[in-house]
Amino acid sequence: MGTLRDRMETDCRLKGFRRATQDVYLRCVGRFAAHFGRSPAVLGEAEIRAFLDYLVREQKVAPSTHRVYVAALAFLYYRVTLERPEAVAKIPYPRVPVPLPDILSPTEIAQLLAATRSLKHRAILMTAYGAGLRVSEICALHVTDIDSERMLIHVRDGKGGNDRYVMLSAQLLTVLRAHWQRSRPPARGRSRPPFAPHIRNTPQRAVPCTTFECTAEREMPSTVRVSRGSMMPSSQTRAVAKKA
């Protein structure tokens, strides 16, 4: 796409999109252009509909993926890069089903943690469950984000680029301190994230499948985080944020 791609990339930055979102949008539009072998500047509603229909019928993309393509093309055409809103005005956004999450029981969580041999892996899973953090948020967690006086964890640059506070239990604080004392990195200005280098492989290495069969088909630590969230009323989270 050449210059058009550069223009769209600039528009994404000006819009404040994260780097990952920019890459996804550019990749979607690039695939759209490659499908027809022409620049999106000379394509219109008919080609957009044909391409989306191709993705759904032949490529069998999931509704969530379909929706991302629609969003990327809408950004390109509607009031932003190409300023041709008529090309996407009648393109519907697909309905995305919201399945119920897979929830672990307190007993299963206890079995999972008991089967985790590594202190580091146990600290990661306990942080996901005890504080409800996402993988990316655990990766970015610094020691200075642990407020042991107010028993809070400061989550920085979370989903949507937002900061928030979450509760810190005494049990989780004890495990985090034990992990830090065992593997404390050298001090270099602001504390280095203690989990970032290895957390992506933790679900595969932390627990043997034969030891904890009930989670063999589930994804961790996202399942662990969702399990914790299902047991904590949303009003508690709001109260913590208000207090902080």
Image (tube, rainbow, N blue to C red):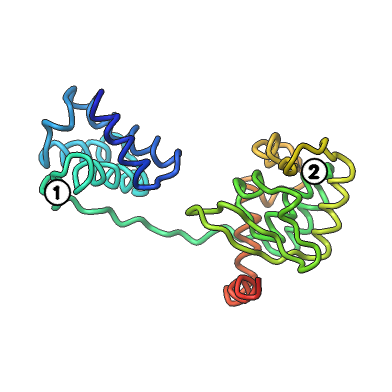
**Quadrant of the image containing the N terminus:** top left
Residue 14 lies, with reference to residue 164, above or below; the image says above
Provide the residue designation for mark 1. 85
Q: Residue at x 23, y 45 (%)?
A: 80
Provide the residue designation for mark 2. 120
User: Tag 2: residue type?
Assistant: Lys
Considering depth in this image, is 157 or 126 the residue closer to the camera?
157
Residue 38 relative to residue 122: left or right: left
Q: Residues within 10 Å of mark 1 (few under 14, many from 20)?
A: some
Q: Hey, which quadrant is residue 61 in on the image?
A: top left
Q: Residue at x 32, y 39 (%)?
A: 60
Residue 219 lies, with reference to residue 237, above or below; the image says above
Q: Residue at x 52, y 57 (%)?
A: 162
SS for callout 1: helix
Which mark is first along the chain, 1 or 2? 1
User: Tag 1: residue type?
Assistant: Pro
Mark-to-mark CA distance, 2 and 1: 51 Å
Answer yes or no: is residue 209 visible. no
Residue 180 relative to residue 23: left or right: right
Q: Hey, which quadrant is residue 48 in on the image?
A: top left
The x and y percentages for residue 137 are 62, 49
Residue 65 lies, with reference to residue 242, above or below; the image says above
Residue 70 relative to residue 136: left or right: left
Between tags 2 and 1, which lies in front? 1
The x and y percentages for residue 15 are 34, 47
